[in-house]
Amino acid sequence: MNVVDMLEGKRVCICGGSGGVGKTTTAAAIAMGMAAEGGKVAVVTIDPARRLATSLGLDELGNDPRLVDPAVFTRRGMEMKGELWAMMLDPKRTFDELIARLAPNEQARDEVLANRIYQELSGAVAGSQEFTAIAKLYELDREGDYDLLVLDTPPSRNALDFLDAPDRLTSFFEGRALQVFLRPTGLGMRLFGRGTGVVFSILKRVTGIDLLQDLSVFFRSLGGMIDEFKERATAVNALLSDRGTTFLLVTSPEREPIEEATFFWRKLKAARMPFGGVIVNRVHHAYDLGDLDVARIASELEPELGPKLAGRVAENLSDYHVLAERDRENIAQLAHRLGGEERMILVPYLDSDVHDVDGLRAIHRYLWATEDERTAMLADVVA
């Protein structure tokens, strides 16, 4: 089992997991590998730390996919047979673009985008990131320009919000609170009655802001887009459960990320979303030391290293062995919770942080290797 097996027949790959487990770099390595094999691939991140841009040798990324220069890879000995595109999601801009697409006409579009109420609300809505991330993925998928789309998602503590984002948007538009404001004879109109009008009039004179007009324009314009928003939410929801989509869980072997990966997997199963497998990063691999005797190891190393350094090396080996045993137990527990599914790839703890193409290639080697090849590489790591 490797990433190629996990992505067979897929056009959308959604990488989910907690923060700090290498999710962004894993998504980049997957996209890079698939592009190297000849596909036209786009990787989408919402990581404000710009790790994706840095790892691909780019100064910055924007809200539209940008082609990564193939020379970035060939200079490091990797042939790029296809195309790798990358972008960093701008939630506010994505929400504005969605409004522009769904507006019934140019006047309604301009009224909403220029409206103060919308500008404040869109910033708050876009800040949650979940719906805008999926909405952008949907747009790219619908355009059909790419063989594969790889999405780096928010941390998995937001897993429920991410998976439920389309349904929550639909519920908002069907909710009583919004409908009250949109009904001509409802509370929305009574809000703009004589008494309240006086208050708004004073506010306008003091601040120069016509809040009454802003509210009126906002709700009137929004009312003409509700059906389109609901249809879009339904289409986005369908994309998440489509056979061409797969979710890959990315985790590390520590207890908390394992718990969050299990949580995300259960949500996927409950929502009947397509599950592709698990990638466990930063694994300390154990090897047979027999009865680990720190004093004996230190004494054997002492002629070469001296007593002080030999003692430190022996203690370090002991600490590593403890971490390796912890990782082995946690990974076994994760496999048990996932019902014994063997769709799991282990990537070792690398000597250096992944911050460039060389680091992505190091991860790529393990993601693309067969089980036997991975076992051999891991044996070299701990040898």
Image (cartoon, rainbow, N blue to C red):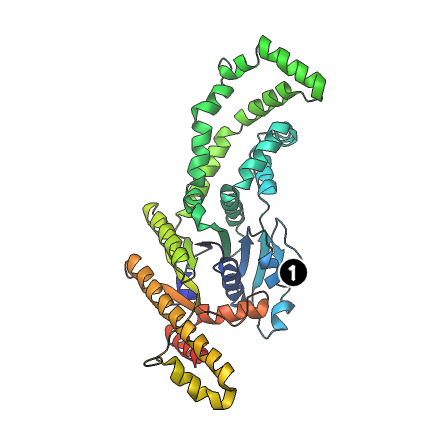
Residue 50 in picture, x, y percent from top left: 60, 55
Q: Is residue 80 above or below residue 113?
A: below
Residue 149 in picture, x, y percent from top left: 50, 55
Quadrant in the rendering for residue 78: bottom right
Residue designated by label 1? 58
Along the line of sight, the residue nearer the viewer: 309 or 18: 309
Asked if one can make out residue 30 in the rendered structure from this viewpoint, the answer is yes
Along the line of sight, the residue nearer the viewer: 194 or 306: 306
Quadrant in the rendering for residue 212: top right
Please give the name of the residue rendered at 43% of the width and 88% of the height, measured from the top-left corner.
300
Instruction: Classify the position of the C terminus by image quarter.
Output: bottom left
Please give the name of the residue rendered at 67% of the width and 58% of the height, measured from the top-left corner.
59
Q: Is residue 218 above or below residue 123?
A: above
Please give the name of the residue rendered at 35% of the width and 45% of the height, measured from the top-left corner.
271
In the image, taking residue 269 as reference, residue 53 lies left or right, namely right
- The kind of residue on which mark 1 rests is Leu
Instruction: Classify the position of the N terminus by image quarter.
Output: bottom left
Which residue is farthest bottom? 303
Q: Is residue 357 above or below residue 381?
A: above
Secondary structure at badge 1 equals loop
Residue 216 in picture, x, y percent from top left: 59, 20
Along the line of sight, the residue nearer the viewer: 184 or 351: 351
Which residue is farthest front? 307
In the image, taking residue 168 as reference, residue 342 lies left or right, namely left
Residue 328 in picture, x, y percent from top left: 35, 68
